[in-house]
Image (spheres, helix red, strand yellow):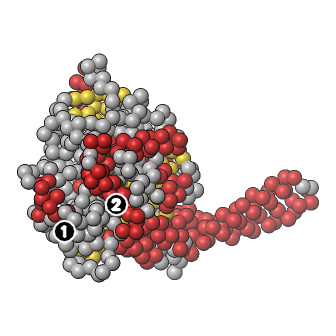
Amino acid sequence: MATQSNIQKMHSATRRIKVNIDNAVRIHRMFSAGIDRFLVVAVPLVFCWTMPVDERVEAAQPNVLLIMCDDLGYSDLGCYGGEIMTPHLDRLAADGMRFTQFYNCAVCVTTRSALLTGLYPRQAQRPRLRTNMITLGEALRRAGYATSLTGKWHLGSEPPLRPIDRGFDEYYGVLDGCCNFFNPAKPDPVFYNGGRSRPFAHNHERITEFPEGYYTTDAFSDHAAETIKRFAQREKPFFVHLCYTAPHFPLHAYAEDIERYRGKYADGYLAMRQRRHKRQAELGLFTSLPILSAEEDKKGNYRYDYDVPDWEQLSTAERKREQARMETYAAMVDRMDRGIGRVLTALDEAGVSDNTVVMFLSDNGGCATWPSGRPGQEEGFLRYNKNVPVGDGRGYEFVGKGWGWAQNAPFRQFKTWCYEGGIATPMIVRWPGKVARGSITHQVGHIIDFMPTVLELAESDYPREFTENELLPVEGRSLLPVFRGIQRDGYRSLSWELYGNRAIRQGDWKLVWGASEKQWELYDLTTDRSETKNLAAIFPERVTAMARDWEAWRESVEK
């Protein structure tokens, strides 16, 4: 039986033979006719041996490793301007391509439903995964892939909505949105979620006990690595979807990891944001560096609208606690990066790296969530965490209003908003020999593009029916032209809606409606990606037309 590893070795051998043949041909052109007699005989003989192997390799569907983290800010990674130590993701970027204009759906659950189905999230009714939708797991299993999902699911914890019900051969992780990192069986605090427990499972079996020294980020990394090694021994290609809960709250990290960042954030939110902006300029991340948007104050009663605290007005104790929050957050990202390093090593050790497309992104912008939405909630939060160090598994902390905004440099706002800070994500792809190393693309991409992209990789189609149900037509477009450095046909429109926030992008024009101010704002992203110069009063006809298109879009997806 030919495993993927063996095929990969044959592929490498074939490439070496081709190089030798090319060298021989060049030598042939340089030297006398006397060597012709050798090449005329030898070259066809070599091709007779290599072509069958090459045909098998070229026809082989690539494996896909799709990694998504939770609540990561746009500028957190080193390769996007951050100071957090992320050498493995930085190496992935150096070996592949970074996107500067890739979009998600602003919050965990909408992004997950869109990524898995290739459809805009349907929010008017539940469940989010319906019988007229096919998931990536189902579509790739249909194409002959082994499929696995590790980590956060957040789309249903009971049949028929679990990962194993929706196309994944292997599942391990939290079926809900978040959990205690050291002990997932520990219920949420009453102040946050009424003391609710979060279901955790391995395939059909619920897990309710976790060993000493357990940490979800490590467990998810190790499970994905072991799954890759196991799948690589089969004849099938594989799809492994790794969904970290890091760095989503609660802020939990090992003390030794936190220590690596001790004191690095002593000068506050704005100073960190400014340093990241400067680093983005040095990296050449944008064709034209967007200006750094200013801190914003609360504008209305939208529950995720906050004042950015004035660092200079905080007491010494408050600053110390704030520093500890960002130090812990950085430690969580750092630990995740090291886990990704182990997962990438598993590809190398299994001999399948060259035939695996690796993609990485975040489900939304950095998270500024603060427990102040209900009367008495913030007081309960303070009591629960009193005398508990940030990062300790006994506590339940948030990175908060200042850091959650600052992490999205240079953009406005954060998770749940439809400004760029809420919906723009780092996106990295590595595909050896196909994606140019160290490249940056400014083409627009969206999370609904993953379905058509992986189906094209798998040389499969998007079916009209599945399990005797007629499917909604896929709404994304393949990213393969972008991966290959080709300009693809862009979207006429991309639209968003969440919790009263709205947006529509047409070309480089973007119309945004904030849930607090409740009015349309218009921005030209060519010159104002940070959305600081509202042009609505100058182009009222464009506002009217784009608003009408957004209404038509919303009606079409929710009908």
Identify which residue is drawn at 72% across, 61% down: 19
Q: Specify which label sits upstream in the sequence, 1 or 2.
A: 1
- The answer to which image quadrant residue 338 occupies is bottom left
The residue positioned 28% from the left and 72% from the top of the image is 182
Task: Give the image location of residue 425, x and y in percent.
Answer: 37, 48
Hey, what amino acid is under mark 1? Arg
Image mark for residue 198: 1
Q: Name the amino acid, label 2.
A: Thr
- Residue 363's place in the image compared with 175, above or below, is above
Q: Secondary structure at mark 1?
A: loop
Q: Is residue 28 visible?
A: yes
Q: Is residue 552 visible?
A: no
Q: Hey, which residue is sitting farthest left in the picture?
A: 375
- Left/right placement of residue 341 relative to residue 503 reads right
446 or 360: nearer the viewer: 360
Figure quadrant of residue 515 = top left
Depth check: 113 or 7 in front?
Answer: 113
Element class at badge 2: helix
Percent x, y of residue 244: 34, 63
Please give the name of the residue rendered at 22% of the width and 51% of the height, measured from the top-left corner: 369
In the image, residue 474 above or below residue 201: above
Residue marked by disc 2: 328
